[in-house]
Amino acid sequence: MTGGNEDLVNDDVTPIGDPAITLRITDADRRRLLEQDVRRGLTDAHKSLPAKWLYDARGGELFGQITQLPEYYPTRTEAALLAAIGPQLAAAAPAHAIVELGAGDSPKTRQLVDACAAGGTLERFVSFDVDEESLRRSTRELAARHPGVRVEGMLADMTSDLDLLPGGEGVLVALLGSTIGNFLHDQRVGFYRDVAERLQPGSWLLVGYDLVKDPAVLEAAYDDSAGVTAAFTRNVLVMLNRELDGNFDVDGFAHDARWLADEQLVRVGLRARGKQRARLDALDLDVSFADGELLHLEVCCKFLRNGVEGELAESGFAIDGWWTDPSELFALCLARRV
């Protein structure tokens, strides 16, 4: 669905920890896919890199800082909303198993599990993530917090490894943080359909959606006054220099975040400050950028309820719950597999 993530799959599924961690991605897989994505993306007429390469160790730290910035409302708004609706959510979706995709170390994971465990039906929690360190840490913390819940981790990619979803009735799949906004329309519908194929009727999908709003608010959220988001996007060049023996001039690129009203998304990338050339010795690859040329890194789509409802309906889901904060910045949507 996105950027050839199917190439991450390693068919040797191996349990590697306690709580149980299932390995589906290896370091060799990551390296192979990085080289493939960089060679393809930096030789294309419209240069791009998949957004996942923003999140090395330093990128993860910087994103954590971004979530605390005054301009960046999504994380705190979704967390407050999840805390407020917890009992309603547990009543509407009395799940026996929760699967959170891209869980990481988020406090929202604890809020979700706390709410559903308090409902008395939760028996199992499965965390999907591509970062082994955060996966191990978060599953251990949850196992200690909820000793009556079977906690498991999947070191796996949510766009290619959904065959690992548990079967049976009463499963709730959660995708929080408006991660769904990184997918364009066809990718979203494909993802919903992939999930629907693996859920029995009556199971649920919980998704966080960042809503369409004042463009000034949106652009500020992705281009903060302290420059943390700019450091986050430029860090991808630091990663390329380190991992692929590159010599990108990091300061030769400016952070670029723009609201595209017709497409209802914020486009995020790096724009060359003057002509730029770089060498990636590990790939035997030379790359050049014209003055002002964009390296595309991410789309952050924004949503309206009617659009969400239509996409879910064509994918086999019906909305059972829709909750927003008082300012209607963000929404949590509970959809049922029909």
Image (cartoon, rainbow, N blue to C red):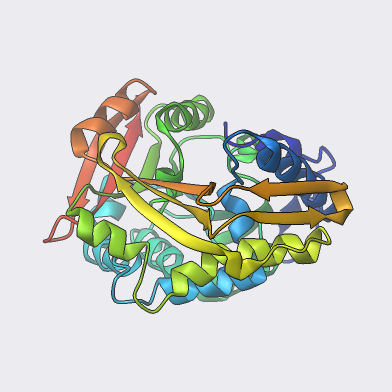
Image quarter in which the C terminus is found: top left
Camera-side residue: 212 or 297? 297
Residue 44 appears in the rendering: yes
Percent across and percent down for residue 131 are 66, 61
Q: Residue at x 71, y 55 (%)?
A: 277
**Quarter of the rendering containing residue 135:** bottom right
Q: Quadrant of the N terminus?
A: top right
Left-right relation of 172 to 286: left
- Side of 108 relative to 85 (left or right): right
- The residue located at (48%, 73%) in the rendering is 64
Residue 337 or 297: which is nearer the viewer? Answer: 297
Q: Is residue 66 above or below residue 116?
A: below
Residue that extends furthest to the top in the rendered view of this protein: 314
Pinpoint residue 323: horizontal percent, then vertical percent: 20, 51
Residue 15 lies, in percent from the top left, at: 79, 54
What residue is rendered at 39% in x and 79% in y? 226
Residue at 69% across / 53% down in the picture?
Answer: 155
Answer whether residue 139 is visible to the viewer in this image: no
Picture coordinates of residue 287, whole percent (x, y): 73, 48
Q: Nearer the viewer, residue 305 or 224?
A: 224
Numbered label tally: 0
Measured along the vertical axis of the image, is residue 204 above or below residue 237? above
* Quadrant of residue 60 within the rendered picture: bottom right
Closest to the observer: 311 or 294?
294
Residue lying farthest to the left in this orientation: 326
